[in-house]
Amino acid sequence: MKDALVPVLVVIGLLLLAGLTLFLVRRPGRGTLPQAPEGERPGIERGEKIPPSVIAPPAPEKAAPEKAAPEKAKEQPAPGKPAVVPAPAPPAPVETAPPVAPPKAEPEIEKPEPTAGRLVRLRARLSRSQNVFGKGLLGLLSRDHLDDDAWDEVEESLISADVGVQATTEIVAKLRERTRVLGTRTTTDLRSLLAEELTEALDPKLDRSLHTGVVDGKPSVILVVGVNGAGKTTSCGKIARVLVADGHTVVLGAADTFRAAAAEQLATWASRVGAQVVRGPEGGDPAAVAFDAVKKGIDAGVDTVLIDTAGRLQNKVGLMDELGKIKRVVEKHGPVSETLLVLDATAGQNGLSQARVFTEVADVTGVVLTKLDGTAKGGIVIAVQRALGIPVKLVGLGEGPDDLAPFDPAQFVSALLGDE
């Protein structure tokens, strides 16, 4: 039995010895090389002892540091404190050439057309009023039998057109008498009679010219007054265009200092025709602006100074004080040549009460009637003249820059009645 176990034990021992040998050969770090491709470390066989110089080669000697410029020793942060990293130095500024602003474009100077015949060119703007006068009245007057009821309708038509009660009564009375005496019935004859009576009601003998030009070596001064909302500042700009169109030179004074947009608006109008504007600080003294405007006009050698005044005052005392002060200050240079009152035609009879206040506190010499194209009540022109005793000198017939026309009674009535 023992003899049978001996070969088995020998085989087991040989296997253990072979396994131990294989383990020692493959284990790294024990003085033998690990498995590696041939030719990687020439001269060293597998399983051969590795010389210490191969396992850990000596470190190369450090080269002596070059001498550098002495630097300030960096401070080491204290233990437990975070290191402070210095902020990077800002980059050196790069010098650039200053931007060159483009040349400012000069506003184009407009040359308005002469005002002669302007009302005739704008007659189509009165088309709404033509429906009342041209078609309405002529239709009533051309009836075969003009009885009392027909004449009552004529009166109602004139009153609805804002001619006014007193003026209407006079016009109808004259028409009735002339129609009865002459026995006219044709539309052409009736139109002629109506045109004559309406023109007479507008008093064509009144002076409607603007008093402009140099007086005693100084420019004429025109004050423009009126309540805000009537188009006063816009009308002031359009009046300047009327004057320039007729060959005058103008300086504008923005004396409406209570409304911030008034001065800018006036400056825009002036720039279009090459006129100069004198303005003051917002809320400043209007009289001081008016004084400076006249002085500028004298120095510039213009023939007319146009002054836009404030229209926001609601009581007669304040209005009288303000306009009176402006007039007194301006008259230190010379007399005021003209005071124009701007009225809104669409306000109708209600606007006459405001107009009377201005005529009582200022020496109004003429009326500028605006927005006449936007109302069917063209008879307001007759009512204004009859109520105020002041001629209408200019009428506004649109929103265009040259839609302000000198007023001519005969041309106006012809436009109201339309074509024959």
Image (tube, grey):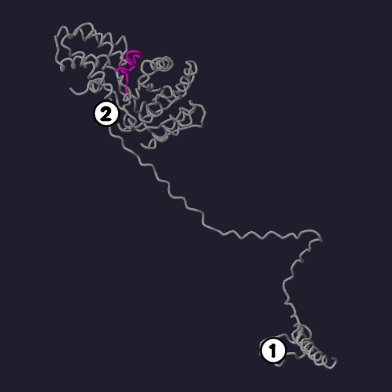
Residue 110: name its quadrant.
Answer: top left
Q: Main secondary structure of the magenta part?
A: helix
Residue numbers of the magenta segment: 379-393
At x 32%, y 20%, the residue is 392
Label 1 crowding class (10 Å Cα cut-off): few <14, some 14-19, many 20+? few
Which residue corresponds to mark 2?
A: 122
In the depicted structure, whether residue 173 falls above or below residue 316: above
In x, y percent, where is residue 220?
37, 26
Q: Is residue 147 above or below residue 33?
A: above
User: Looking at the image, which residue is at 46% across and 30% down?
Assistant: 292
Circle 1: element type: loop
| Residue type at numbered disc 1 | Arg
Q: Quadrant of the C terminus?
A: top left
* Residue 19 in which image quadrant: bottom right
**Residue 381, percent from left and from top:** 31, 18
Mark toward the viewer: 2 or 1: 1
| Pointer 2 local density, CA inside 10 Å: few below 14, some 14–19, many at least 20 | some
| Residue 265: numbered disc | none
Decide: is 41 above or below 170. Answer: below
Task: Say which mark, if any, is on residue 41.
Answer: 1
First reached walking from the N terminus: tag 2 or tag 1: 1
Q: Is residue 190 left or right of residue 66?
A: left
Amino acid at dot 2: Leu
Quarter holding the N terminus is: bottom right
Task: Using residue 190 as the reference point, say whether residue 125 is left or right of it.
Answer: right
Q: Nearer the viewer, residue 302 or 234?
A: 234
The residue lying toward the viewer, choosing from 140 and 406, is 140
